[in-house]
C-alpha cells in the first residue's frame, strides 16, 4: 500500500512539473513554440545576410518602419528603399514596407541599449515561417556616442536613423535635401544588414576598408565610411539620388544569393 501511494505521489509530481514547464513556455511565446518571437531578430549585424538576399529560407520580406512622432521619413525615401530592396533581394513572394508613427520619447540622445529596449517593446514584425522581417526606427534625437553619426545598423535585422539629426543638417539653403540624405543613410545601413563589407557577404575581391570598419575602399560607393555621418554631406551636394553600390559590393551581394 505504501508503495502504491509513493508511486502516485511521484506521478503527480511529474505531471505538475510538465504542466509548469509548458505554462512557462506558452507565456514566453504567445504564438507557441519554445523560442521567443524575436529569437531570429537579435543576432549580430550581417549574420542574416544570406537569408535577406536569397529565397532559400525566406521568400517574403516585411520591413517595419516606425518613426517617433514628428519625424516621419520623406515619402521619396520610402519609395527609394522599396526600389533598392527590390533590385537587390530575391524575394519572389514580395517585399512590403509598412510605416507607422509611435510616441516620441523626447530624449536629446539615445544609446544602443535604449534603442534596443524600445524596439523590444514596440516591434511587431518578426522572422518566422517563410517571412523575413526587418525593423527600422527613426529617432527624435541623436546618437549618444557620436553626434555626427546619422544611422546605425545594430542587430541582424535592426536599423536606427537619427532623423532629428538628419533634419538638422539637411533641407536648408546650400544643404543637401532631407529626402536625399534620408535615402542615402537608409540604403547604407541596409547594406550593412546585407553583409557589406566583408561582414556576412564574403568578398569576391578585396575592397574592405578595415581602418573604418565594415566599409568599402571606393570613395564614390554607397558603402564608403563617411556616407553614414555628417562628414559625407558635401559629397552629396549636387546629387539627385544616393551613391550607387560599386561593382565589388554588387558582386559580393550576388555571390551571396542576391540579384
Image (cartoon, helix red, strand yellow):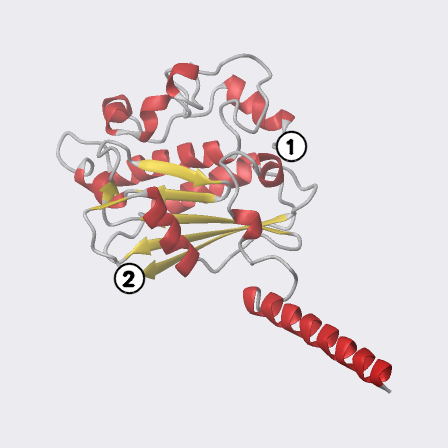
Graded by Cα atoms within 10 Å as few (under 14), some (14 to 19) or many (20 or more), the crowding at tag 1 reads some
Which residue is rendered at x = 17% and y = 40% of the image?
168
Q: Is residue 202 above or below residue 155?
A: above
In this image, 12 relative to 24: left or right?
Answer: right
Q: Is residue 75 visible?
A: no
Question: Element type at marker 2?
Answer: loop
Sequence-first disc among 2 and 1: 2
* Alpha-carbon span between mark 2 and mark 1: 37 Å
In this image, 47 relative to 14: left or right?
Answer: left
Residue that mark 2 sits on = 103
Which residue is rendered at x = 32% and y = 61% of the image?
102
- Residue 130 lies, in percent from the top left, at 66, 52
How many callouts does the rendering have? Answer: 2
Task: Name the residue at the top extreme.
Answer: 206
Question: Element type at marker 1?
Answer: loop
Quick one: quadrant of the N terminus?
A: bottom right
Q: Image quadrant of residue 143?
A: top left
Residue that mark 1 sits on = 257
Q: Is residue 258 above or below residue 5?
A: above
Q: Are marks 2 and 1 in contact (CB under 8 Å)?
A: no
Q: Is residue 9 above or below residue 139?
A: below
Q: Is residue 246 above or below residue 146?
A: above
- Residue 190 lies, in percent from the top left, at 45, 37
Which residue is rendered at x = 43% and y = 42% of the image?
81
Q: Is residue 44 visible?
A: yes
Nearer to the camera, 245 or 6: 6
Amino acid at each position: 500500500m505504501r508503495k502504491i501511494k509513493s508511486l502516485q505521489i511521484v506521478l503527480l509530481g511529474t505531471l505538475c512539473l510538465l504542466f509548469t514547464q509548458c505554462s512557462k513556455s506558452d507565456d514566453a511565446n504567445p504564438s507557441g513554440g519554445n523560442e521567443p518571437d524575436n529569437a531570429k531578430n537579435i543576432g549580430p549585424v550581417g549574420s542574416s545576410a544570406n537569408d535577406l538576399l536569397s529565397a532559400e529560407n525566406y521568400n517574403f520580406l516585411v520591413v517595419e518602419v516606425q518613426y517617433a512622432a514628428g519625424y516621419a521619413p520623406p515619402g521619396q525615401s520610402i519609395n527609394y528603399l522599396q526600389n533598392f530592396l527590390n533590385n537587390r533581394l530575391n524575394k519572389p513572394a514580395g517585399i512590403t514596407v509598412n510605416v507607422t508613427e509611435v510616441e516620441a520619447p523626447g530624449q536629446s540622445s539615445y544609446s544602443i541599449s535604449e534603442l534596443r529596449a524600445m524596439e523590444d517593446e514596440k516591434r511587431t514584425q518578426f522572422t518566422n515561417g517563410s517571412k523575413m522581417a526587418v525593423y527600422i526606427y527613426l529617432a527624435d534625437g541623436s546618437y549618444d556616442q557620436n553626434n555626427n553619426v546619422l544611422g546605425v545598423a545594430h542587430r541582424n535585422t535592426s536599423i536606427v536613423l537619427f532623423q532629428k539629426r538628419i533634419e538638422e543638417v539637411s533641407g536648408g539653403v546650400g544643404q543637401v535635401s532631407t529626402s536625399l540624405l534620408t535615402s542615402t543613410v537608409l540604403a547604407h545601413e541596409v547594406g550593412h544588414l546585407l553583409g557589406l563589407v566583408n561582414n556576412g557577404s564574403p568578398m569576391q575581391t578585396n575592397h574592405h576598408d578595415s581602418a573604418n570598419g565594415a566599409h568599402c575602399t571606393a570613395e564614390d560607393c554607397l558603402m564608403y565610411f563617411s556616407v553614414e555621418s555628417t562628414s559625407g554631406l558635401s559629397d552629396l551636394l549636387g546629387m539627385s539620388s544616393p551613391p550607387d553600390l560599386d561593382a565589388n559590393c554588387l558582386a559580393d551581394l550576388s555571390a551571396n544569393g542576391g540579384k
